[in-house]
Amino acid sequence: MNTALIHSDAYSRFDYGPEHPLRMERLGLTWRLMEAYGLTGLSKAKILAPEPADEEAICRHHRREYVEVLKKVSAGEHVPTAPLYGLGFGDNPSFPGLWEVSRLAVGGSLLAAQLVADGEVERAFHFAGGLHHARPDRASGFCYLNDPVLAILHLRQRGWRVCYLDIDAHHGDGVQFAFYGDPHVLTISTHERGDRLFPGTGFVEEAGEGEGRGYSVNLPLQPFTDDLVYTGAFEAVVPPLVRAFRPDVVVAQLGIDSHRTDPLTHLALTVQGFARTVARIAELSPRLVALGGGGYDLQNVARAWTAAWAVMNGIELAPTIPAVFSEDLRRFGFRSDTLWDPPEPTEPAIRRQAEEYAQAQVETLRRVIFPIHGIA
């Protein structure tokens, strides 16, 4: 199995601001934990740094007037219309280098797609990617350019059928609506229910339109859904649809804000539950382009994406984090020196509510979506 890991130290030069929940340190922290485990020197794995995407590639999805505004606010210019593009406040601050880091994130995901499309590797992981909320003409949810959409468009240029599988706690709205009428791209998103969490979309009724009817699939979940409930719902929906669709490649968004300690969301997965889901995605994927995504408790991000990269290479990691990582353990306030989470039983009433809600969504998908794909 040939794989590729894509990372750049250049990401550390950019900062959303001290109060913003998306901290760029998570990328370097993840790299160092991978390095501590020996995962950055695997014999069959390429380690590559991306180049920024060129403007023409970006404008395959994003409107030029929006790109021009991004460039201006990135350079520190005052743009009175910036709020019309979702820029300059709250989730999407304007900061120096905004255009450059956004181009770099797109470049990394395009590189991952290119490596897989050219047959150089079977699996590629760009963990700085997965910025799935950005729209063609506006920033949204910490995302300025939608690198998953651009990676999918690159793969579609090869004539490939693409399954986009998003396990972030937030609905992958920007990707879903980019391909809402396209039967050659199957988007599947598992996420916390939209009436409880940003972006307020991702209901089972959002099923695509025209020829794409049935190719947008949403599995919303109740707050406090744990590993057991999540796995049952995932297995009921995702494998049957992926097998029926028969993609040439899977593009997976691996947000870890579904973790039980994430400060912005309310799901209750563990790192080991996340890793098992990644393993399942890898099994289902003839080829895999994996991207990062959300995750706002830094220790979860580093542990989960390190585990994900190990899974992609068929490696089982020791549960105790190597001692060489001890300085980062202290600096970033890790709660323990273990890769995996300790048991934390879910209250029976909470689990029952989560199970009932998940089962209702599964039944609706079986009734509405499965017949379109010939699944009995």
Image (tube, helix red, strand yellow):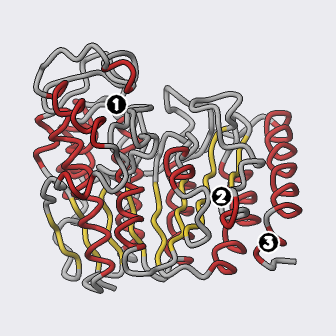
- The mark found on residue 22 in the picture is 1
Q: CA distance from mark 2 to mark 1?
A: 28 Å
Mark 2 element type? strand
Residue 86, x across and y down, in percent: 39, 25
Foreground mark, 2 or 1?
A: 2
Three-letter amino acid code of the residue under disc 3: Ile
Label 3 environment density (alpha carbons within 10 Å; few <14, some 14–19, many ≥20): few
Between 225 and 116, the residue placed more toward the observer is 116
| Left or right: residue 64 compared with residue 166 | left
Q: Which numbered disc flags the more N-terminal residue, 2 or 1?
A: 1
Residue in view at x 25 percent, y 84 percent: 120
Is the residue under label 1 in contact with that under label 2 (CB below 8 Å)?
Answer: no
Corner quadrant of residue 60? bottom left
Quadrant in the picture for the N terminus: bottom left
* Distance from Cα at disc 3 to Cα at disc 1: 38 Å
Name the residue rendered at 56%, 52% in the picture.
176
Q: Is residue 136 left or right of residue 55?
A: right
Q: Is residue 336 above or below residue 361?
A: above
Q: Position of residue 212 (x, y in %)?
A: 66, 64
Q: Callout 1 environment at 10 Å: few (<14), some (14 to 19), or many (20+)?
A: some
Q: Position of residue 13 (x, y in %)?
A: 11, 35
79 lies left or right of 369: left
Q: Nearer the viewer, mark 3 or mark 1?
A: 3
Q: Mark 2 = which residue?
A: 216
Residue that label 3 marks? 372
First along the sequence among labels 3 and 1: 1
Location of residue 79 by image quarter: top left
Q: Nearer the viewer, residue 9 or 313?
A: 9
Asked which secondary structure carries label 1, the reply is loop
